Amino acid sequence: MRSGRFGRVEALSSGPVTQQASGRLIVATPGQGFTDITAAIAGFVHESGIGNGLASVFCRHTSASLTIQENADPDVQTDLLTALDGLAPRHDAYVHGSEGPDDMPAHIRTMVTDSGLVVPVVGGRLALGTWQGIYLIEHRDRPHRREVLLTAMGG
């Protein structure tokens, strides 16, 4: 087994969890694709007043999901949707199909992506990398209203 090299963990903060905030974000999707929700979550964290801690993001659906992905080149989203189409194609011989040919593939795509994310909060801001954004991925063909629950906790 090969092992990478790494240094000591740099302490960023330490202290008790003294506050928390929770909220709900409704996202109207236009149909299949990525919706960037980073700014809404960053605004929620800022308004919470939490300087250091964690932000939790949870999608309350089984046919839409969340991801942290590149925010610079939209071709990445196109390629990711193509890859998901290859993994869980529409019109395959699925047993579950009562809600249409895009329903079961949407469930599979949600299973392999994420329904929940946790992002560190450092200095009152989401500690995302330079090219990272938080996206809700709509896996169904038609528009939907999706509910995302947010929690920030820390001090």
Image: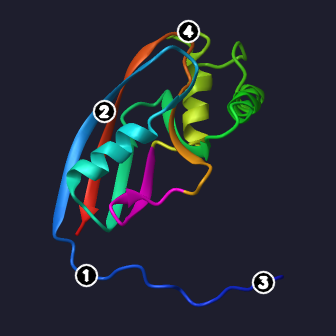
Region in magenta: 116-128
Question: Which of the labelled discs sits on residue 25, or is there none?
Answer: 2
Please report the residue visible at 58 percent of the width from the left and 19 percent of the height from the top: 32
Can residue 119 be found in the magenta stretch? Answer: yes
Q: Residues within 10 Å of mark 1 (few under 14, many from 20)?
A: few
Dots 2, 3 in contact, CB < 8 A: no
Name which of mark 4 and mark 1 comes first in the sequence.
1
Can residue 66 be found in the magenta stretch? Answer: no
Q: Residues within 10 Å of mark 4 (few under 14, many from 20)?
A: few
Please name whichever residue, 111 or 116, is drawn nearer the observer in this view of the structure: 116
Q: Nearer the viewer, mark 2 or mark 4?
A: 2
**Mark 4 and mark 1: Cα distance apart in space:** 50 Å
Name which of mark 2 and mark 4 comes first in the sequence.
2
Please name whichever residue, 100 or 6, is drawn nearer the observer in this view of the structure: 6
The answer to whether 150 appears left or right of 8 in the picture is: left
Question: Which of the labelled discs sits on residue 66, or is there none?
Answer: none
Name which of mark 1 and mark 3 comes first in the sequence.
3
Tell me where residue 103 appears, x and y as whole percent.
Answer: 55, 18
Name which of mark 2 and mark 1 comes first in the sequence.
1
Q: Residues within 10 Å of mark 2 (few under 14, many from 20)?
A: some
Q: Residues within 10 Å of mark 3 (few under 14, many from 20)?
A: few
| Residue occupied by mark 1 | 15
Q: Which kind of residue does numbered mark 1 sit on?
A: Gly
- Numbered disc 2: secondary structure: strand
Outermost residue on the right side: it is: 2
Name which of mark 2 and mark 3 comes first in the sequence.
3
Q: Which kind of residue does numbered mark 3 sit on?
A: Ser
Question: Which of the labelled discs sits on residue 3, or is there none?
Answer: 3
